[in-house]
Amino acid sequence: MNELHIEIRQATPADVPVAVSILTEAAEWLERQGMGMWRDDELHPGRIARDVADGLFYLAWADEPVGTIKFQLSDEEFWPDMPTGDAAYVHRLAVRRAWAGRGVSAALLRWAAERTAALGRRFVRLDCEASRAPLRALYERAGFRHHSDRSVGPYFVSRYELDVQATLPWRPSS
């Protein structure tokens, strides 16, 4: 089987509806599965537009936009106990349902690891609801190790990190 070619590029203001659409599709699917995720105004187009304007959102393309990721260099909300400047942080990783299981998540995580290394940072960090076993397994298959669990507002999250200096060139395990 041929490997899927995925290109990651920074979202522009014109891409806000696409990013919102991908995130909303993922959120609605998760809700139908009984695994609701993002709350309140986290997916509001105005909020996404501000993050896009700040250069935080990226889109995965495979002939069409197939996924999105928010990539930031600090995370005081979920990682306030970590030193500044040693990591990049991933949020809002989402893939269109038609592309699920085709390597888009792995490509986005690999891109985040490579970008983190290129920026001279040691770790990529992310979090998810602690009860989301399939998502936790995805991160662990991608080489992330469980760091800790923490209550953050309405969330109880499991925090993960990938040491990019120790793992690049990085390839997710099957």
Image (cartoon, helix red, strand yellow):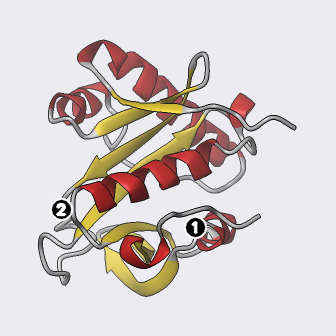
**Residue occupying image coordinates x 77% and y 64%:** 174
Residue 25, percent from left and from top: 58, 31
Give the mark nearest the N terminus, 1 or 2: 2
Picture disc at residue 51:
none
Residue 143, percent from left and from top: 57, 73
Amino acid type of the residue tagged 1 in the rendering: Tyr
Residue 150, percent from left and from top: 36, 83
Left or right: residue 84 compared with residue 159: left
Element type where label 1 sits in the image: helix
| Residue 38 can be seen in this image | no
Q: Which residue is mark 1?
A: 139
Q: Is residue 119 above or below residue 8?
A: below
Amino acid type of the residue tagged 2 in the rendering: Ser
Element type where label 2 sits in the image: loop
Instruction: Measure how far apart labels 1 and 2 are at the Cα level.
Output: 20 Å
Q: Which residue is mark 2?
A: 74
Q: Is residue 101 above or below residue 124?
A: above
Q: Quadrant of the N terminus?
A: top right
Q: Is residue 50 above or below residue 131?
A: above
**Residue occupying image coordinates x 12% and y 73%:** 84
